[in-house]
Image (spheres, rainbow, N blue to C red):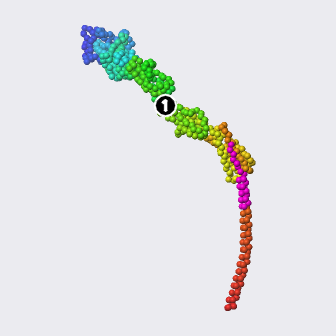
């Protein structure tokens, strides 16, 4: 049972003013609510049968009450007190559960549910706790770069609108950063907004970086308490540009130093391994003790073979840090003797040499009229077939584009030389006369016939190859004739003749006629002999038949005589 008020104060008003009665077994009850949500507080008192009304109040820090809601049990009406901070935010249900919408930090109070009868006042206190999740932490005011071996502010981690306040932690590559004198300095501070009563937490980090921090992620987190307990929210990763001094210098040669040839442009590129890399260097050329100040590149144009040597570069402010590279400028020289267009006479000797001078062993190829030769040409006695376009070509296989070639156009000249041949047709009726000509430039051939005879076939010429060709005609002479072949070029005119006899043709014709007459006479005699033989045969055959008949008659007569003789004897 609840304790009763003093008997001398029976009025309900007195009961409300002086009531401090709690139901046995009721302790502190806490309602946790998220910021902005609706706070729901059940009365936690069994409603008595003789209930007159119920009320809700909260207690100020000094303990004085502030009534905020009233509900009559008889009239079923609800009244809300004129408390500005709860205007239009309260709702009191029939079972006297109080709801407060849009929870605020200022709602963190001790609320009391009061149920009043004619004689008693029953109270049940509820403590309200409001929580506000902070914003996701963010790393701000980030340093544009960090320098090795220097303590420098890395940035600030900030998280806003938290209630209650939270705690910020820094991480390097996922591991917690702890304060370390001279290397890690963390300063934490918090600030509450006087209107919203929400906290903003800020943590600044000063950090002494090393090269091991290159590409290392830094993060931070905020740990706070919510309605369901402790939680942690992490920021996005931040990676910082780490500055460190140059410790080594290297030099590059472009293009590749194994493929530089005369006429190329060489670009020297000097690099330092610091961050940021050095912007200026000193370049040292072969034979020049003083360096040339330039950016990280230095270009030499149209280099010659005397540019071969050691090239160096160093830092401007630290000349002892130096790098070098040996460069060979490859070259290739070719000398062909003789070269160009050369005219020689047939049978002459012509020494030919192709001399090569190169930075390394070079390959040599000879070509004649675009056909590769097995060996270099050598002419102790020139022939017409030796004429042509000769090319000596050399190259360095290891150096792209380094090739040289020289050409020799050899012309072999000769006066016309003539050789005539004769060929008789098997029938003996015609003769083929051939005029073989050799010479260069190409001689022109002309035929002349002295005597009578018919030309069966006009002159025909063969192709002109290696200074040689021929012309032929077919003739059937009626008498002895002379054929003259004339060959002429720019050097000389040459004439040669050949006599062709007609007797040979006549003798062969007579022989053929005699042969034919003999054959005909022979055939006639053979036919005559055959006729005589046949006549004799036929005559003999008739005589033989008569003798046979006579013999047959004698035989019959003899037979009859024998028969008669037999009869006589009988």
Give the residue drawn at x 29%, y 10%.
Answer: 63
Residue 245, position as x, y percentages in the image: 38, 19
Give the residue drawn at x 71%, y 52%.
Answer: 429
Q: Give 313 or 190, whichever is nearer the viewer.
A: 313
Residue 548, position as x, y percentages in the image: 71, 78
The secondary structure type at the circle numbered 1 is strand
Give the residue drawn at x 69%, y 84%.
Answer: 559
Q: Give 94 or 494, whichever is nearer the viewer.
A: 494
Q: Is residue 393 magenta?
A: no
Q: Is residue 386 above or below residue 296?
A: below
Q: Is residue 35 left or right of residue 494?
A: left
Can residue 377 be seen here?
Answer: yes
| Quadrant in the picture for the N terminus | top left
Q: Is residue 538 left or right of residue 117?
A: right
Q: Residue furthest front?
A: 348
Q: How would you rate the neighbour count of disc 1 (Cα within 10 Å): few for under 14, some for 14-19, many for 20 or more?
A: some
Residue 31, position as x, y percentages in the image: 32, 17
Which range is magenta?
Answer: 495-519
Q: Give 369 or 501, whichever is nearer the viewer.
A: 501
Image quadrant assignment for residue 293: top left
Q: Is residue 332 above or below residue 288?
A: below
Q: Which residue is tagged 1?
A: 358
Image quadrant assignment for residue 164: top left
| Prevailing SS of the magenta stretch | helix
Q: How many marks?
A: 1
Q: Is residue 26 left or right of residue 355?
A: left
Q: Is residue 182 above or below residue 374?
A: above
């Amino acid at each position: 049972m609840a304790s009763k008020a003093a008997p001398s104060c029976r009025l309900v008003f007195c009961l409300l003013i002086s009531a401090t009665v709690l139901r046995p077994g009721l302790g502190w009850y806490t309602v946790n609510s998220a910021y902005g949500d609706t706070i729901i507080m059940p009365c936690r008192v069994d409603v008595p049968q003789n209930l007159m009304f119920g009320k809700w109040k909260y207690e100020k820090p000094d303990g004085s009450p502030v009534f905020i809601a009233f509900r009559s049990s008889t009239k079923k009406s609800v009244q809300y007190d004129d408390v500005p901070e709860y205007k239009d935010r309260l709702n009191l249900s029939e079972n006297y559960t109080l709801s407060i919408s849009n929870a605020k930090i200022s709602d963190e109070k001790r609320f009391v549910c009061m149920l009043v009868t004619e004689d008693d006042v029953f109270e049940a206190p509820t403590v309200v706790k409001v929580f506000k999740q902070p914003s996701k932490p963010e790393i701000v005011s980030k340093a544009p770069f960090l320098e090795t071996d220097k303590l420098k502010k890395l940035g600030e981690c900030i998280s806003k609108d938290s209630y209650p306040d939270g705690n910020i932690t820094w991480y390097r590559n996922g591991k917690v950063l702890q304060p370390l004198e001279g290397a890690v300095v963390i300063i934490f501070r918090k600030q509450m907004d006087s209107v919203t009563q929400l906290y903003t937490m800020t943590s600044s980090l000063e950090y002494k970086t090393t090269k091991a921090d290159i590409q290392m992620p830094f993060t931070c987190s905020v740990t706070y308490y919510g309605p369901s307990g402790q939680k942690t929210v992490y920021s996005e990763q931040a990676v910082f540009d780490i500055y460190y001094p140059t410790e080594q210098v290297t030099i590059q040669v472009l293009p590749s130093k194994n493929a530089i040839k005369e006429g190329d442009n060489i670009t020297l590129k000097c690099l330092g391994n610091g961050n940021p890399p050095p912007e200026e260097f000193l370049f040292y050329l072969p034979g020049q003790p003083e360096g040339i100040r330039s950016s990280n590149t230095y270009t030499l144009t149209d280099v010659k073979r005397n540019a071969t040597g050691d090239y160096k570069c160093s830092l401007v402010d630290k000349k002892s840090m130096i790098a070098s590279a040996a460069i060979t400028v490859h070259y290739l020289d070719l000398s062909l003797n003789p070269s160009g267009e050369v005219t020689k006479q047939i049978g002459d000797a012509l020494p030919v040499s192709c001399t090569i001078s190169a930075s390394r062993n070079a390959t040599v190829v000879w070509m004649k009229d675009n056909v590769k030769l097995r060996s270099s040409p050598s002419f102790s006695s020139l022939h017409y077939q030796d004429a042509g376009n000769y090319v000596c070509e050399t190259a360095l296989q290891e150096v792209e584009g380094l090739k040289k070639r020289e050409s020799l156009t050899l012309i072999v000249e000769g006066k016309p030389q003539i050789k005539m041949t004769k060929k008789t047709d098997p029938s003996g009726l015609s003769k083929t006369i051939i005029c073989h000509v050799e010479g260069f430039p190409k001689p022109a051939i002309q035929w002349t016939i002295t005597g009578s005879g018919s030309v069966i076939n006009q002159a025909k010429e063969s192709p002109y190859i290696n200074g040689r060709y021929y012309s032929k005609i077919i003739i059937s002479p009626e008498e002895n004739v002379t054929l003259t072949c004339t060959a002429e070029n720019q050097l000389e005119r040459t004439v040669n003749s050949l006599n062709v006899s007609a007797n040979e043709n006549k003798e062969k014709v007579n022989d053929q006629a005699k042969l034919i007459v003999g054959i005909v006479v022979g055939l006639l005699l053979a036919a005559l002999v055959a006729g005589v033989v046949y006549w004799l045969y036929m005559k003999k055959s008739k005589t033989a038949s008569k003798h046979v008949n006579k013999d047959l008659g004698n035989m019959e007569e003899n037979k009859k005589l024998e028969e008669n003789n037999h009869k006589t004897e009988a």
